[in-house]
């Protein structure tokens, strides 16, 4: 039997159906939006991960590049330092060449002129000269040759010292006997012009030293003391020391060395500003310094203009084991 629904009941059913459809539609939209949101979150997480990886890669590259740049800058600094040293060395060599040329042109000219004039006189007027006059010219030639030989030897010695080629050959030395044997011919050659006095306050056992180098030290300093001391002046050589070292002092009464010249005193071709016309190459004290250094010693100077100069040389009594 068919039941007929009332009109208000139909409308109520339609409203419920419509509500359910609307709700279902909203649920579907929410699900879709939720899925979109989750996908966006996943995309953002993926992008964040990629960004972090990129940042890490960039940081690694920056660190590596920083290290490369630091190494490159260090290499540049080293190259700059080497270039500066090379330029300074080149300047030193250039200055040395200039000083050598200046020294040769001045110091060699006098003995060469002496030889030339004596040879010309002997060649042209030998038949008019007495035997004694001829011998005098031969002595002048001989003296000039010896002087030039000394200059050449000094230059060769300085060249060896510049390139650390000095030969050091120590032997057992009795210093008192060695100094006395060295000073006797020097004193004989001085005559009455200067006095050379030697003193030692103790008995010395033999020490290890290179006689050639010690002779160079003494000969150059004493020669300077004689050259720059007035006639009648005294050069005093004192030998002191203890169980570990030898202290040698050479004291003169010469013209002295100005304070402003003392810092460069041991440089090659360096001469004091008050030497005037006194001849010299400026190599003597440079040779002394090289000899003292090769012997493992030290040298000190005290000087006052018009009063005199004292050189104090300290040498080890015994050489280090690695040098023996």
Image (spheres, helix red, strand yellow):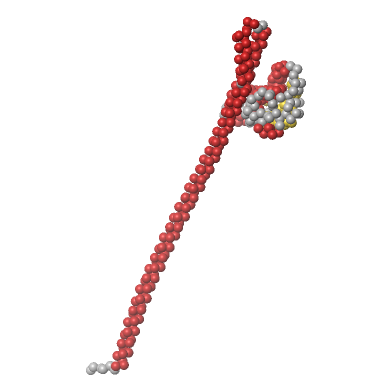
Residue beneath the point at 60% across and 12% down: 120
Residue in front for this viewpoint, 296 or 291 = 291
Picture quadrant of residue 191: top right
Task: Classify 29 as above or below 208.
Answer: below
Picture quadrant of residue 119: top right
| Rendered location of residue 226, percent (x, y) | 71, 22
Left/right placement of residue 73 relative to residue 129 reads left
Q: Please, which residue is most extreme toward the top here?
A: 127
Picture quadrant of residue 238: top right
Whether residue 284 is visible to the viewer of this picture, yes or no, is yes
Residue in front for this viewpoint, 260 or 212 = 260
Task: Classify 190 as above or below 316.
Answer: above
| Rendered location of residue 55, percent (x, y) | 45, 58
| Rendered location of residue 222, percent (x, y) | 70, 23
Quadrant of the image for the C terminus?
Answer: top right
Residue beneath the point at 31% across and 87% down: 14
Residue beneath the point at 39% across and 65% down: 43
Residue beneath the point at 57% across and 35% down: 88
All told, the count of numbered labels is 0
Left/right placement of residue 321 relative to residue 42 reads right
| Rendered location of residue 38, percent (x, y) | 39, 69
Quadrant of the image for the N terminus?
Answer: bottom left
């Amino acid at each position: 039997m068919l039941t007929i629904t009332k009109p208000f009941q139909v409308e109520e059913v339609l409203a419920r159906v419509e509500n359910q459809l609307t709700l279902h539609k909203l649920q579907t939209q929410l699900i879709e939006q939720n899925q979109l949101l989750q996908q966006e979150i996943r995309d953002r997480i993926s992008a964040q991960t990629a960004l972090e990886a990129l940042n890490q890669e960039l940081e690694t590259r920056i660190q590596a590049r920083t290290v490369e740049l630091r190494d490159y800058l260090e290499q540049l600094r080293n190259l700059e330092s080497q270039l500066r040293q090379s330029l300074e060395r080149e300047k030193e060599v250039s200055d040395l060449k200039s000083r050598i040329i200046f020294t040769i042109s001045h110091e060699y000219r006098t003995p060469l002129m002496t030889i030339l004039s004596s040879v010309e006189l002997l060649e042209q007027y030998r038949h008019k000269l007495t035997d004694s006059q001829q011998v005098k010219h031969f002595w002048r030639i001989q003296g000039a040759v010896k002087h030039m030989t000394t200059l050449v030897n000094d230059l060769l010695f300085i060249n060896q010292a510049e390139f650390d080629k000095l030969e050091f050959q120590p032997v057992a030395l009795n210093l008192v006997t060695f100094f006395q044997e060295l000073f006797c011919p020097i004193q004989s050659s001085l005559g009455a012009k200067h006095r050379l006095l030697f003193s030692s306050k103790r008995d010395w056992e033999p020490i290890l030293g290179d006689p050639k180098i010690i002779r160079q030290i003494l000969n150059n300093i004493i020669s300077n003391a004689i050259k720059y001391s007035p006639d009648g002046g005294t050069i005093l050589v004192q030998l002191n020391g203890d169980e570990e070292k030898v202290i040698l002092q050479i004291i003169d009464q010469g013209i002295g060395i100005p304070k402003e010249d003392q810092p460069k005193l041991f440089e090659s071709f360096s001469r004091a500003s008050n030497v005037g016309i006194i001849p010299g190459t400026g190599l003597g004290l440079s040779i002394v310094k090289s000899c003292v250094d090769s012997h493992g010693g030290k040298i000190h100077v005290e000087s006052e203009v018009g009063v005199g100069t004292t050189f104090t040389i300290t040498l080890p009594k015994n050489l280090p084991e690695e040098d023996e």
